[in-house]
Amino acid sequence: MSEQRDRFTEHGQGQVFQFYDDLTPEQKDLLDRQAAEIDLTEVTRLFENLVQTTSGDSGNESLADQLSPAPFTPLPKNNGDPALWQTARETGEAALRAGRVAAFTVAGGQGTRLGFDGPKGTFPVTPVTGKSLFQVFAEKILAASRVFGKPIPWFIMTSVINHGDTVSFFEQHEFFGLEAERVHFFSQGLMPAIDDQGKILLAGKGEIALSPDGHGGSLRALVRSESISKMNAVGIDTISYFQVDNPLVRCIDPEFIGFHLLNDSELSSKALPKRDAAEKVGVFCEKDGQAVVIEYSDMPERLTNERDPNGDLRFRGGSIAIHIFSRELVRRLGTNTDPALALPFHRARKKVAHIGDDGNLVEPADPNANKFEMFVFDALPFAENPVIIETAREDDFSPVKNAEGSDSLQTSADDQLRQFARCVNAAGVDLDTDETGLPGIQFEISPLFADTEERFVTAWESQEETPEITDGTVIE
Ligand code: UTP
């Protein structure tokens, strides 16, 4: 008799074990292990709070009266104080030289929109050599480690769906020049899908329908995987968080780190002025005196379109999922089991294929189930001294989300090319571009040659001979 079977039966979830007697010992073992990871009290609570009680959209308008735009520190080019940015930069650089910073990538998502068969981080993105997203980040981290004279450890969160493939990809490529023992992989948590009656669904007769618990699951996964203890042991207290899909991201940004530390912040975020009202990013707002991110789908429409007297969008601070966490905040939120002090779950209605009571697979035509995810930006109201600084799109954000159209490989490769063109032109090369800054040729700069425009100019000027930049040139 299975201990888990008893526990599930007591919680009204006995259906999960309805085919148990027909399973092989290995299948039984797998089901028992999956079941042991599930917190049934949490599942019941989520069913009661998020499925049975439908909040609907009626709260949307009353939400509008509670929100104001959260202020952010503007860039020097947008009337920010250059001296303040300089101080931040020096503070961040000192922290990097002291070895206080780790890089952290969340790479546990399913990447459904991209439709690529494999972990998203292995997707080739650079315009000439087709380096993968992981290689781009690895080289940026290695470049920063060299500049600041301290190795920067890299933590990568995967999920069961892609863990093995991710680790073997790094092994095959010899960790792209990083020291293997400083690259730490761990899998994120999983949540069961439930139907509208609160029953946990089976993906197979001996397999629970599980899916990753969202990027917000990264906080508890950092704790459970002992990554936080590892950081503590080597004196890392500052975590540079970014997503796997954005090749432009400054993985290690001294100014950002500096603002975080100068303000004794537990969570700092980058705000990107929205391109237009329709851009699908969350928005930094203030609610009850606290900074929060409101998802674009939850933003009351009248606020989304509202303009200030200058004609700018009033709620324009877009959240692009680039953060600095203090180790302490992650420890606190990742450890807390009190639902009032941990990240909340959000419900998503999804189509989930599952085994019916007759043992046959049911493939629904419409959403039939509820999945639960946590969002990392929900950490904001829990943080002491949150900081929000402005960033420039061309320096930090061009994600690969879709196979085609906006936020695709094409748009991201073009944005990389524009960045490369800005670098070489800043160094005095007269490379032709169109009015958007896009060169007519494909070329590439390795982060190992230079990872910022400023360092590119210095490195370029120190070359005895510089190559002519033509179609296919790779500067490395
Ligand atoms: P997205 O929201 O873009 O989701 O994730 P996704 O799964 O990558 O792609 P779609 O929506 O299926 O097309 C944003 C970031 O959060 C990570 C992703 O890997 C990506 O870096 N993420 C998302 C996780 O690490 N775990 C999750 O459970 C969800």
Image (cartoon, helix red, strand yellow):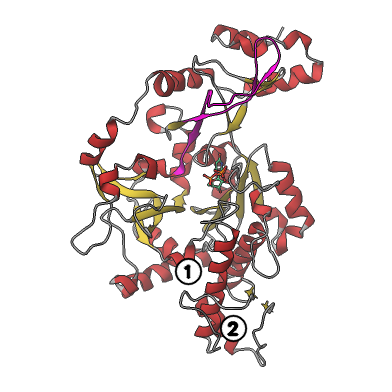
> Image height check: is 156 above or below 353?
below
Q: Secondary structure at mark 2?
A: helix
Residue 335 visible within the image: yes
Query: Residue 459 shows which numbered tag?
Result: 2
Q: Residue furthest bottom?
A: 464
Q: Nearer the viewer, residue 425 or 2?
A: 425
| Camera-side mark, 1 or 2 | 2
Please, is residue 235 above or below residue 296 in the view? below
- Which residue position is annotated with label 1? 93
Between 5 and 298, which is closer to the camera in this rendering?
298
Which mark, residue 233? none
* Disc 2 crowd, CA 10 A, few/some/many (<14, 14-19, 20+): few
Asked if residue 459 lies in the magenta stretch, the reply is: no
Which image quadrant for residue 182? Answer: bottom right
For the residues marked 1 and 2, what is the alpha-carbon distance in whole angstroms?
A: 19 Å
Q: Is residue 373 magenta?
A: yes
Q: Please state the horizontal and vertical placement of residue 312, each as a whole percent of the image.
A: 26, 61
What residue lies at 64% left-to-right and 61% top-to-bottom? 125
Q: Characterize the local packing of mark 1: few (<14), some (14-19) or many (20 or more) Cα atoms within 10 angstroms.
A: many
Q: Nearer the viewer, residue 20 or 385?
A: 20
Magenta residue span:
348-376
Q: Residue at x 38, y 45 (%)?
A: 296
Question: Is 396 located above or below residue 205 in the figure?
Answer: below
List the single residue furthest toward the left: 309
Q: Position of residue 392 (x, y in %)?
A: 41, 66
> What type is the residue that disc 1 sits on?
Glu
Q: Position of residue 77 (x, y in %)?
A: 34, 74
Ligand 1, by image quadrant, is top right
